Structure formats: C-alpha cells, structure tokens
Image (spheres, rainbow, N blue to C red):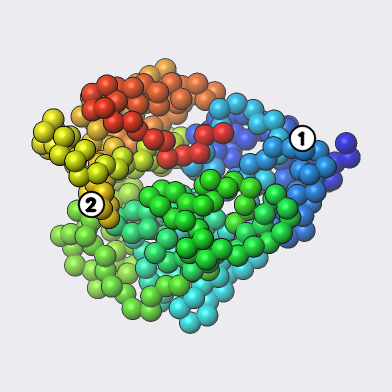
Amino acid sequence: MRLQKKIIINKNLNELNSLRIAVKSRYFIECKSDKDLDLAFNFIKQNKLKFVILGEGTNVIFRKDFDGIVIKNLYKKEKKITNDNVKISSGYNWDKFVLYCLKNSLFGLENLSGIPGTVGAGPIQNIGAYGEEISNYVKHVEVFNFADGNTEILNNKNCDFSYRGSFFKKNNHLFIKNIFFKLDKKFIPKNSYEDLRNFKFTKALEIRKKILEIRNKKLENYKVNPNVGSFFKNPLMNKNEFKSLRVLEPKVKFYNQDALIKISAAWLIENSGLKGFNFYKARVSNRHSLVLINEDKAPDSILKLRTKIKNLVKKKYKIKLEEEPTII
C-alpha cells in the first residue's frame, strides 16, 4: 500500500477527543480542501476502509482503537455574508461563528452561544440550547458523499431534523462542507427558558453574555475536566405516558416539545441519587448531573458509568436514557 504524504499511520487520538481517551486510528488525514477530500475518498475506496469524520471531538466516545481512517475536519474555505444569508464552512469553530454573526448584526443563533465543537457538527446533532435549535436557521447544507465521491446539496426539509437528530446522524458517509444559514436582521430576544425569564435583553450580545455566564457556572470545562457536555438526551413522552410519570413523581421537571413532553434527564439522574456519583475513574459532575467526567485513559470507566446510570434510571422510572454523543 502506497501512502500519500498527508496520510498518517497509527495516529494517537488522545488530544483529539474531549474525554482524552488514549486510542489510536490505523490511518489519519486532515481535510482542509476539496483536493484532500478526493484524496481521502480514493484511499478509502482503494483499500476498502472504514472511516469516521471528526470535528473538534467534543461529542464523541471512542470505545477502542479505530481500524480504519479518521478524517479530521479542518475545512475552512468559506465565510461569506450576503444580506441575511451566511455561507460558512464546516471546519470553523461554532462559538466563534456565532460571535461573527452577532458582530455583523445577524441574529438568531445567540441562544446557542458557548456550545463547543465545529460548525459542521451543528446540523448532525441539530444542536439546541436555551429554547433554540440550529434547524430553525439552516437553509441548506452542502456535503461531500464518501459513498460515490459526489458533492450534493440538501435543503432544510431533506436534512430531516428532529430533537438532537438529523439525516446526517443516520448517514455518516456524508462530510458536511458548507452550511447556508438564513438569519434575522432584527434582534428579537428569546428568553422563555427558565434561567433567562427574569432578564430584559435589548441587545443580542447581552443574551449571549448571560448564556455564557450560565454555562460557565453550570457546566464543566472539558479542557480541565474531560467530558462531552450533556451525555444523555432528554427523554420524550406522549401525554398519557407523562400522566403516569406525574403520578409517580409530581415534581418531575419537564418542557413542552411540540406535541410531546420532554423530561429533564438531569432531574431523573439527580433524583436517582447520582449527582456527584463516582464509578471507577469516572464521575457525575457536582455542577450538572448530565455531565460525566472522565479520568481514565481507557474508555472503560466512562462506559461503565454510563451503563450504571441507565440501569438505575430505568429501574426507578422505567425510562430508557439515550446517549447524546456518538459512540464509535
């Protein structure tokens, strides 16, 4: 097998995932351009390799060494504003992009301030926070298809957005190249979320500042305490299921999610007596019970803690928690 200069063998991924799990990838390539994507595509096809696309690694868990090629997304070709439309390449940092929009008087994404990761990870997870979701502003997405080597464009409907999900999550052969956003020229504060209700915001930068303060107070810095942010999704229930739960737990924390009810996974974990819980070399954060902190170079501790939490919550509430990060 002849390797191109850009392809690295046995790459240690310890510094490329926010849990600091010390696993290796058989092959590794950084993709900054269309030429790099073509190179990676041809290498995968010729050698019949598995592959995974990696952004900043803040929402991924490696269970073991990866016997394939990791494609590191450093694609930063575009950052362009036309009226209220923005075209941005997927390799840019998400929070810096939010600030870039606000400084150019384009609004809507301010409630999503402080979320770690790349712009390209946003549509995959349909990232959301403080009463807002990225899907409300995505116009269309340009992708490189690693199945056939073609570039395609998907509109918002094609993206099949759902709560913390999308078409991309089910089709991980698609490398998101560029995202086209349609934003608002007028700032309308969205402060329905409980932590924001008591404040009056006249500027988008004010709501951004408050959200960053809340996040810094509640959440753990992954650079200090390795974590992937919210480890579990908030479970969704229909109204009949919710009535049964309310009989068992009248004080359960919940939110309306369209026709469904969204139950606070943090509340379920905390009320199962697990806040601050230690298990092997991993623990539930004392700040926020959705954050699991890893202190193990191997993935064993965080995965065992994950299973322990799921089992205890299911036993007490008959609710199955689902992981938010991608497990590879």
Amino acid type of the residue tagged 1 in the rendering = Ile
Q: Is residue 269 above or below residue 36?
A: above
The quarter holding residue 262 reads top left
Residue 138 position, x and y percent, is: 47, 65
Mark 2, Cα crowd under 10 Å, few <14 / some 14-19 / many 20+, is: few
Q: Is residue 92 above or below residue 7?
A: below
Residue 304 position, x and y percent, is: 43, 21
- At 73% from the left and 53% from the top, the residue drawn is 148
**For the residue labelled by badge 1, is the local secondary structure a helix, a strand or a loop?**
strand
Q: Nearer the observer, disc 1 or disc 2?
A: 2
**For the residue labelled by badge 2, is the local secondary structure a helix, a strand or a loop?**
strand
Residue at numbered disc 2 = 256
- Identify the residue at the far front of this view: 240
> Position of 191 compared to 160: left or right?
left
Residue 230's mark? none
- At 26% from the left and 27% from the top, the residue drawn is 318
Q: Is residue 162 visible?
A: yes
Give how far apart the Cα atoms at labels 1 and 2 are.
48 Å
Residue at numbered disc 1 = 9
Amino acid type of the residue tagged 2 in the rendering = Asn
Residue 298 position, x and y percent, is: 54, 23
Q: Is residue 255 above or below residue 300?
A: below
> Position of 13 compared to 283: left or right?
right
- At 36% from the left and 64% from the top, the residue drawn is 110
Give the quadrant of the N terminus: top right
